Amino acid sequence: MQGAAEIVRIMGLDGSAWALMGAAAAYFLAGVGSAIGIGISARVANGVLSEDPAKFGSLLVLSALPGTQGIYGFITAFMILGKLGAAANPLPASTGYQIFVAALPVAIAGLLSAIYQGMVCAAGGSMIAKQPGEVGKAIVLAALVETYAIFGLIASILLLNQIK
């Protein structure tokens, strides 16, 4: 862990600053990805709804799916803030840096998977426009992308739980 300690020393940030940057990155990046993904999917949904408003329920589900990554980022940020609140003593810089790094899986996986899930959901919305009975297939395909956001969340949780 000597390399990480050297980076922490060079940057001159204390442990709480590193940890807060991790919480912010988890929430911000996953949230931005969700907003972009929902935007991509909702644009197609609006086009389909202009032709057939009865498909709203199916399209709502597909448009909302990319929003889950933002929730995963929020959960991780909340866990980090809880870890900060539980620290009785000032947080060592190396511990804060570890927390920052532990937040990266959900931050990066959330950002990218939400955008790509939005693209898959948009394609699913186009499919529903022509074949309304195939909504289940569209959701399953979108859930495949979701898997990697869940892996990012699990990785961040596991990493955070290893930090003393």
Image: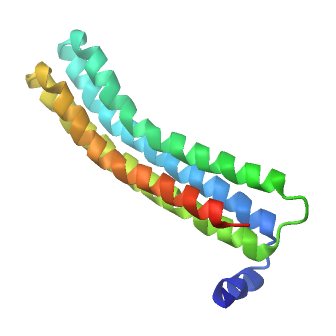
The part of the image, by quadrant, that contains residue 58 is: top left
Residue furthest out toward the top: 54
Q: Residue at x 50, y 52 (%)?
A: 153
Colour pattern of the rendering: rainbow
Q: Residue at x 27, y 46 (%)?
A: 144
The part of the image, by quadrant, that contains residue 55 is: top left
The x and y percentages for residue 2 are 68, 90
Residue 68 relative to residue 42: left or right: right
The x and y percentages for residue 21 are 68, 61
Q: Is residue 12 above or below residue 24?
A: below
The x and y percentages for residue 52 are 19, 13
The x and y percentages for residue 116 are 31, 49
Residue 159 relative to residue 94: left or right: left
Q: Nearer the viewer, residue 46 or 149?
A: 149
Residue 101 relative to residue 34: left or right: right
Q: Residue at x 50, y 60 (%)?
A: 155
Which quadrant does the C terminus fall into? bottom right
Q: Nearer the viewer, residue 123 or 136?
A: 136
Asked if one can make out residue 111 in the rendered structure from this viewpoint, the answer is no
Q: Nearer the viewer, residue 44 or 87?
A: 87
The part of the image, by quadrant, that contains residue 75 is: top right
Residue furthest out toward the left: 130
Residue furthest out toward the right: 89
Q: Residue at x 82, y 73 (%)?
A: 92
Q: Nearer the viewer, residue 47 or 72?
A: 72
Residue 79 relative to residue 114: left or right: right
